[in-house]
Image (cartoon, rainbow, N blue to C red):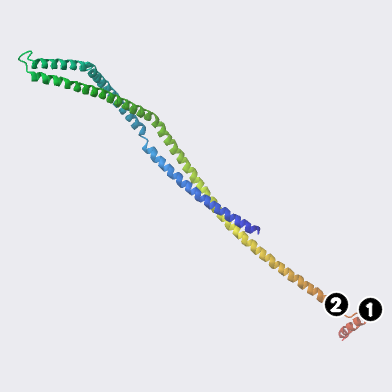
């Protein structure tokens, strides 16, 4: 019974070690894939610090150029606004003077003027007011747009500069992770080999336990047969003892004188034969 329990335990141990070996194999395969992926990533990002620095430098140049354009546009826009600041009043005054002159022309004063030309000039003066307002609006809008553009370019440049500062550390971290993954693959490879060896050993142990269980069974069978033989021997001995007892009961009893006579009679023929 103990050998059978040992065999069952050895089988359970072998099965557990096989599952452990399978798990170690999966772990080793995963570690190798991780190491390969990190190695490729490290190779592809090796030039990233230099590239991001060039990007940061370029975006800074763009930001500087945009800022310069913004300053020019702001000055130009502000100049237009300043120049046309009193344009509305001046145009109104010019239009009023032309309308007055046109009224006088129609009244015949002064004589010899082309009244239609004066009236057209008054109308154009009134329309010029709208044109000036459009120019002022466009100048103001241009100033706002270039200001926003300059601000956006500056933010992009700042972001790229920050990226250029952080990328080397990121690339270094990727390199360290790749080296760590390489060490991990070495460990998982050893673990896989150890698990495979343990599984093989457990399998051999299970085989030995099975043989031990079989030997124990045969030993038990031999013991049973030996017990049967011993039982038969005991029975035979008992029969022999009974037979001897029965035989002794049938042997006749003799007195001392009768035994002496029998001895003499038995010895006589031997003596006669010797004399002859």
For the N terminus, the quadrant is: bottom right
Tag 1's secondary structure?
Answer: helix
Q: Position of residue 226 (x, y in %)?
A: 70, 67
Q: Is residue 90 above or below residue 241?
A: above
> Helix, strand or loop at disc 2?
helix
**In the foreground, 263 or 52:** 52
- Residue 168 picture quarter: top left
Residue positioned most to the left = 112
Outermost residue, front direction?
Answer: 107
* Above-or-below relation of 11 to 176: below
The image quadrant where one finds the C terminus is bottom right
Q: Looking at the picture, how far across and down is residue 162, in whole percent?
A: 38, 28
Q: Is residue 247 above or below residue 71?
A: below
Bin the neighbour count of mark 2 within 10 Å (Cα to Cα): few under 14, some 14-19, many 20 and up.
Answer: few
Which residue: 59% across, 55% down?
10
* Extreme-top residue of the structure: 110
Q: How many marks?
A: 2
Q: Give me the residue at 81% from left, 75% from top.
A: 242
Residue placed under numbered mark 2 in the picture: 248
Does the rendering let one see residue 227? Answer: yes
Residue 196, can we see it? Answer: no
Compared across the picture, whether 229 is left or right of 47 comes to right
Q: Nearer the viewer, mark 2 or mark 1?
A: 2
Residue with the mark numbered 1: 256
Q: Position of residue 135 (x, y in %)?
A: 21, 22
**Sequence-wise first label, 2 or 1:** 2
Residue furthest to the bottom in view is: 276
Residue count near mark 1 (Cα–Cα under 10 Å), binned few <14, some 14–19, many ≥20: few
> Which percent across, then down, holds residue 62?
29, 27
């Amino acid at each position: 019974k103990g050998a059978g329990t040992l065999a069952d335990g050895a089988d359970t141990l072998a099965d557990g070690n096989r599952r452990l070996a399978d798990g170690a194999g999966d772990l080793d395969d995963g570690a190798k894939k991780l190491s390969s992926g990190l190695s490729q990533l490290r190779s592809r990002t090796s030039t990233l610090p230099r590239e991001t620095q060039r990007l940061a430098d370029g975006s800074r140049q763009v930001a500087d150029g945009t800022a310069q354009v913004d300053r020019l546009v702001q000055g130009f826009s502000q100049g237009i606004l300043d120049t046309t600041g009193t344009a509305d009043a001046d145009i109104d005054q010019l239009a009023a003077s032309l309308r007055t002159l046109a009224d006088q022309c129609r009244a015949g004063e002064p004589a010899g003027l082309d009244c239609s030309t004066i009236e057209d000039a008054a109308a154009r003066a009134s329309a010029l007011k709208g044109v000036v307002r459009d120019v002022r609006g466009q100048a103001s809008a241009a100033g706002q747009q270039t200001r926003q553009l300059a601000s956006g370019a500056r933010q992009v440049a700042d972001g790229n500069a920050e990226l250029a500062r952080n990328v080397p550390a990121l690339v270094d971290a990727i390199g360290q992770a790749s080296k760590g993954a390489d060490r991990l693959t070495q460990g998982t490879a050893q673990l896989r080999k150890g698990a495979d060896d343990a599984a093989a050993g457990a399998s051999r142990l299970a085989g030995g336990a099975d043989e031990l269980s079989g030997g124990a069974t045969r030993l038990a069978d031999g013991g049973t047969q030996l017990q049967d033989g011993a039982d038969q021997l005991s029975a035979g001995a008992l029969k022999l003892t009974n037979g001897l007892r029965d035989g002794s009961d049938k042997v006749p009893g003799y007195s001392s004188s009768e035994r002496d006579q029998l001895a003499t009679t038995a010895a006589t023929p031997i003596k006669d034969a010797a004399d002859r």
